[in-house]
Amino acid sequence: MKKTNIRSICFTGVMAALVFVFTFTFKIPLGNGYTHLGDAFIFLCAYLLGGKKAPFAAGLGAALADLVSGYTMWIVPTFIAKFLMAGVCCIVAEFLFKKSMVGWAVGALCGAVVHIGAYSLAWYLMFDKATMLASFPALVLQTVVGVVVATVFVVVFHKTKTDTKLRSMANYNALGKKPQTAQEEK
């Protein structure tokens, strides 16, 4: 069993911190809560960290933002929704499209749909159908903006080859070596 090293853990923590910062700091208050740019960094987590680390960084960063913001009743639903969003994005990108740019884009769209569905279900279970429907447009807008902003970052990272450097930092193995093959990366 391969052990994760400190560098990989730290990079995952940095991504969780970015999700937290862009969820907590850049928020726009709405009637039922707030909208933010944190979702863009969740999709970046999926792109840079992969399926084993991204869901945890996404869920943890977003849930901590709810905790600090005073939305404590949303901590668990947020963790689940963001975990699923990043997880679905990674599953589609890694297993169905073999980590291609198109795979990430399709994965991000699939993750966005799961995110909207999970939050809508949470609104329905915690409140009622009317509250769920009232929050739906803001939820969709937040998620779509997250996909668009993340896409801009991903394209820039890919064109400048920054994504390769960041991914290698995130995926060092226990011996401190970069994975040479896709099999070693798993």
Image: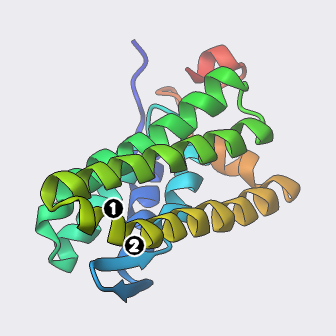
Amino acid type, callout 1: Ala
Q: Which amino acid does label 2 sit on?
A: Thr
The residue at the point 55 percent across, 29 percent down is: 91
Q: Residues within 10 Å of mark 2 (few under 14, many from 20)?
A: many
Judge by depth and name the residue closer to the eye, 13 or 156.
156
- Horizontal arrangement in the rendering, residue 108 relative to residue 133 (left or right): right
**Numbered circle sitting on residue 179:** none
Q: Is mark 1 on a helix, strand or loop?
A: helix
The answer to whether residue 8 is seen in the rendering is no
75 is higher (above) or lower (below) than 26: above
The image quarter containing residue 9 is top left
- Mark 2 = which residue? 23
Taking depth in this image into account, of 83 and 129 the one nearest to the observer is 129
- Image coords of residue 157 (percent x, y): 76, 58
Residue 40, picture quadrant: bottom right
**Residue 124 on image: x %, y %:** 22, 55
**Of all residues shown, which one is farthest toward the front?**
130
Front position in the image: 14 or 158: 158
Q: Are marks 2 and 1 in contact (CB under 8 Å)?
A: yes
Looking at the image, is mark 2 or mark 1 earlier in the sequence?
2
Disc number for residue 62? 1
The N terminus lies in quadrant: top left
Q: Quadrant of residue 181?
A: top right
Q: In this view, does 126 lie to the left or right of 165?
A: left
* Secondary structure at numbered mark 2: helix
Circle 1 packing at 10 Å, graded few (<14), some (14-19), many (20+), is many
Q: Which residue: 43% across, 64% down? A: 19
Residue visible at 45% across and 43% down in the picture: 114
**Label tally:** 2
Q: Where is residue 27 in the image (x, y as percent from the top left)?
A: 40, 83
For the point 46% across and 57% down, the residue is 15
